[in-house]
Amino acid sequence: MAERNLDFDRPIDRKGTKCLKYDFAVERGMPADILPLWVADMDFQTSSYIQDAIVETASHGIFGYSESDDAYFEALQGWMRRRHQFEIEKKWVVKTPGIVLALAMAVKAYTKCGDGVLLQSPVYYPFSEVIRDNGRRVISNDLVLGEDNRYHIDFVDFEDKIVRENIKLFLLCNPHNPVGRVWTEEELLHIGQICLRHGVTVVSDEIHHDFIFKGKHHVFAGLSDALADITVTCTSPSKTFNVAGLQASNIIIKNENLRKAFIHQLDAAGVSQIGLMGLVACQTAYAHGDEWYEGMLSYVRGNIDYVRSFVEERLPDVRMIDLEGTYLVWLDFRGTGLCQKELEDKVIYEAGLWLDSGAIFGKSGKGFERINVACPRSTVQEAMERIEKAFTK
């Protein structure tokens, strides 16, 4: 059986499929004809191996409670070994319907109401939501945009915040969404040394770990036994294989006490097995999805290169932040001189684009827009030409 879904140029109409990106614009306050490049899923069909496995499973006609077996773990173990040089044991894996749920469970497991939880703004907005909505305080070690057009960590401020706010939990985004950094081994070890010194547990969201275009992804827990002992590693096939709607994530926790505390919160929330189709998709993706993954990654790299060239050549007041990982381009519109509302209105009503406003990622994201380029090249071209028309009048 050969992989069939390798034509990433082919537009696929997602309208009328209950698609969050395309079918709910008006419900979310956007014009009906807007072009959406906001939410982080892809406009590509997933691997044909996954499609076929789901169809075969559906043909059985019984969709009762299901659980993973040894083949599921072996597929996950194999992917983490060959793609990330990270060895895992079966008992370390806790399955959840998604990583945001896992973040919330970690906040409840490792902190108490009123505690501060550390993150690094601008960052994926559910980080802040799961902290605030669970009665904890958001403490930010803001990332610093350097002259090299990349974001950096202020390590002095990082440690100072931990000490002053008595931080016991840090939510790490690795690679970082939305700024596109692939943290180096040296940066991660520096973070780790500080966290070890002050007894801080680290939840490392590594959902974008398969999208690396510069540098090398380092699993935070894989850098040392000591770091593995304080880390909850969050992984999922959802971004890599475009199966977010099937809701399957693998949370890897080596430390038994951390794992028990995490599972306790899952139990308290009434979360047990994940869905059958999520299990099937995850196992199939990691066992048979390599060819599709390599083709998709190469195609997305081409889209990123296209956007970079377009911005440099045709958008004098816009800057694309250097993207090392993820398929989410971080565009700096501050050179336009527009205030936040003016920027949003121009993007939505003049360019006709639904992007993710940088402001939702934290105060330091104001003046930026996040654009998802995991779609056919024709869609990316259309989006960039709309931006050019709106911003270079």
Image (cartoon, rainbow, N blue to C red):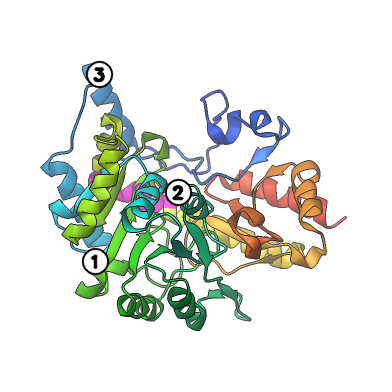
Q: Is residue 366 above or below residue 7?
A: below
Q: Position of residue 283 (x, y in %)?
A: 23, 42
- Quadrant the N terminus occupies: top left
Residue 134: mark in rendering: 2
What label sits on residue 85 in the rendered view? 1
**Label 2, residues with CA under 10 Å away: few <14, some 14-19, many ≥20:** some
- Look at the image and say whether residue 289 sits in the magenta stretch: yes
Pick out the residue farthest to the right. 393
Q: Is residue 143 left or right of residue 189?
A: right
- Callout 3–callout 1 Cβ contact below 8 Å: no
Q: Label 3, label 2: how many angstroms apart (C-alpha)? A: 41 Å
Q: Residue at x 17, y 47 (%)?
A: 73
The answer to whether residue 117 is magenta is no
Dot 1, how many residues are within 10 Å of its Cα: few (below 14), some (14-19), or many (20+)? Answer: some
Q: Position of residue 182 (x, y in %)?
A: 44, 69
Location of residue 170 with respect to 271 vertically, above or below: below
Image quarter of the C terminus: bottom right
Q: What kind of residue is marked 2?
A: Asn
Q: Is residue 50 left or right of residue 66?
A: right
Task: Report which quarter residue 111 is drawn in.
Answer: bottom left
Q: Residue at x 65, y 62 (%)?
A: 363
**Which residue is label 3 attached to?**
59
At label 1, which amino acid type do we have? Gln
Query: Which residue of the protein is positioned furthest toward the top in this rendering?
Result: 61
Q: CA distance from mark 2 to mark 1?
A: 35 Å
Circle 3: element type: helix
